[in-house]
Every structure is written in C-alpha cells, then in structure tokens.
Amino acid sequence: MVDVFSPAKRSSIMSRVRGRGNLATELVVVGLLRKHRIRGWRRNTSIFGKPDFVFPKERLAVFVDGCFWHCCPKHKSQPVANRLFWRTKLAKNRARDIRVTRTLRKMGWTVLRIWQHECRTSNLPDLAAKLRAAVQKASAP
C-alpha cells in the first residue's frame, strides 16, 4: 500500500504521536506489585530514560518492554512491508535501551527490564518473584 503522504509530511504527523507505554502490561505489573505487597514504587518520575516504575529508595528502575518494539529475543519479528525502515527503527530502539541501561547503571541505579510476554497470566508467579528479588537485591548494602 502506498502512503498518501510525503515522507516529510508522514514524519511530521508521527512526531506528534506521544507514546504512553504499553498500558495493558504496565497495569498488570501495577496489579502484581499491589497483590504481592511490594512497596516503595513510583510511576511517571523524571529519571533519565523514563522508566515505567522507579523504586527511589532502592535506586531501582524497572522498564516494561514490548516484545516487538524492543526486539525481544524470544518474539522479535520484522514486518514484511517497508523492511529497511523497520530494521532501522527497531535497531535504534534497541541501541537506545542499551544506552539508557548503561547510563542509569553509571548513575548508581539498578535496572530491571521486563518483557511483555512475562506479563502473561501463566508467568505472573515468576514475575512476582523476579520483582521481589530485584527490590531486595537493590536494597541490600
């Protein structure tokens, strides 16, 4: 299918789209944190890289990454149409994730990345254990 807009116009339109993260998976994590009484987390904080959840006291940043957008090794796929664009776009996303993780670690933060597929109902017990362990490890001296 041919785009009805010029590349410049399409870029202008897309630049106005503001992502809010993957709300469905983030809400699963919120529910999980509440259910398992994992306390001390905040959302929408102004920390480099915009983590989805932050445990300020423990200096733990948690990102919930979508399998497609962040190139999950288990589920990554490349669209057939406009292959070069998507390969470049997804590579930039992955490079940004690596840069954000490294920068936060240099700033003294622990970084935990959760894949979208880990938020499935069948994986929730393992995810709860993973979150609890990350918080405990980050809070240890």
Image (tube, rainbow, N blue to C red):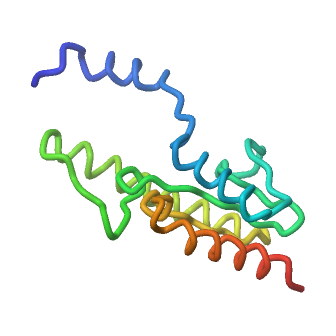
Q: Quadrant of residue 36?
A: bottom right
Residue lying farthest bottom? Answer: 141
User: What residue is at 89 percent from the left and 64 percent from the top?
Assistant: 57
Give the image location of residue 73, x and y in percent.
34, 69
- Taking depth in this image into account, of 37 and 44 the one nearest to the observer is 37
Q: Is 2 placed above or below 112 here?
A: above
- Taking depth in this image into account, of 141 and 126 the one nearest to the observer is 126
- Taking depth in this image into account, of 24 and 18 the one nearest to the observer is 24
Residue lying farthest left? Answer: 1
Label total for image:
0
Give the image location of residue 99, x and y in percent.
56, 62
Q: Quadrant of residue 39?
A: bottom right
- Taking depth in this image into account, of 103 and 45 the one nearest to the observer is 45
Image quadrant occupied by the C terminus: bottom right
Give the image location of residue 103, x and y in percent.
67, 64
Q: Is 64 placed above or below 126 here?
A: above
Going by the image, does 122 lie left or right of 59? left
Going by the image, does 108 lie left or right of 105? right
User: What residue is at 80 percent from the left and 56 percent from the top?
Assistant: 41
Q: Is 44 placed above or below 14 here?
A: below
User: What residue is at 70 percent from the left and 64 percent from the top?
Assistant: 104
Going by the image, does 23 lie left or right of 71? right
Q: Quadrant of residue 60?
A: bottom right
User: What residue is at 54 percent from the left and 66 percent from the top?
Assistant: 124
